[in-house]
Amino acid sequence: MAKEIKKIGVFTSGGDSPGMNAAIRSVVRTCAYLNLDCVGIYRGYQGMIEGDFKPMDARSVNNIINKGGTILKSARCDEFRTPEGRKKAHDQLVSEGIHALVVIGGNGSFAGALLFNEEFDFPVMGIPGTIDNDILGSSFTIGFDTAINTVVGAIDKIRDTASSHNRLFFIEVMGRDVGHIALNAGVGAGAEEILIPEQNLGLERLLDSLKRSKKSGKSSSIVIVAEGDRTGKNVFELKEYVEEHLPIYDVRVSVLGHMQRGGNPTCFDRVLASRMGVKAVESLLEGKSNYMVGIRDTQLILTPISEAIKAHTDIDEELIRVSDIMTT
Ligand code: F6P
């Protein structure tokens, strides 16, 4: 029989993402609604090991739905990778009387949760929070929509100056090993080329495409480069390469960096986070454990964490085709 759950711990882990606060708020308010105690665990697994806990009631999450970052802070924790670290974390949870966990994070955070569940039979439920949108079992992760809108806004601004000076810009965007941010923001901002890890078309094609651009009368160009791109050259090396082979171009580089992780979440991310928080708590109460809440079409679904962490979500081939057509 499933253990009775009266107190739930919630934490954020790994890289923060806009909408994590909305997810925390949702978990806390759902607990309040269902007369459960809720405890915020600060700094992810590190705070769990150290017993950095704070009881949270419905009012403790006032005015955070609109805020980027995470009020519970986040961390990447090496100690939790060790059996001793996980044992310490378990002892802290038991002494605090916490019966189940909701982890808001990405792949690494879920892998830790899975291990923890296997070792201590501790109920866990995952909510995907990362700007990378790389988690199997959800078409969207919390923070992705905000991040691509932030990136599009930044590219729009760069385009203004690029076109004023007839320049070519290489813009590096985040996404770790996947190209979802690059492809979506690239199409949304009308980039001339998008380099993503899932599709290495080689440098020749880049030169050809830039030559064609010039020939067709374009005076400025934007090339989006996913940080995990596999051409073998980073944005600065790409700049040198193009300057060497196509001296006609005046090239500049912009690395957008961590600004992509900040900012107020979009309405989409706030609603997604609110829905996922409710589903996570309700699923734990139904006796489910070791699942991640995800969204497919418009429906919330549960995927075993063991499946969710197996691979990254595939890139959208149709969107690649659209991007190819749009760059003619
Ligand atoms: O996973 C989110 C992410 O922002 C990736 O896109 C990026 O590669 C990484 O985190 C950066 O991590 P950190 O903030 O630890 O440098």
Image: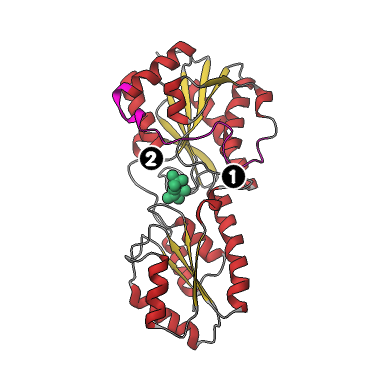
In the image, taking residue 154 as reference, residue 317 lies left or right, namely left
In the rendered view, would you say 177 is above or below 62? Answer: below
In the rendered view, would you say 56 is above or below 270? Answer: above
Of the image marks 2 and 1, the number of the one nearer the N terminus: 1
Q: Which residue is mark 2?
A: 308
**SS class of the residue under badge 2?**
helix
Q: Residue at x 48, y 44 (%)?
A: 130
Q: Which residue is mark 1?
A: 269
Q: Residue at x 54, y 35 (%)?
A: 276
- Going by the numbered disc 1, the residue's amino acid type is Asp
- Going by the numbered disc 2, the residue's amino acid type is Ala
**SS class of the residue under badge 1?**
helix
The range drawn in magenta is 64-84
Whether residue 72 is in magenta: the answer is yes
Q: Residue at x 59, y 61 (%)?
A: 154
In the image, taking residue 31 as reference, residue 227 lies left or right, namely left
Instruction: Decide if residue 107 is in sight here.
Output: yes
In the rendered view, would you say 270 is above or below 112? Answer: below
The residues bearing labels 2 and 1 have C-alpha atoms spaced at a distance of 20 Å
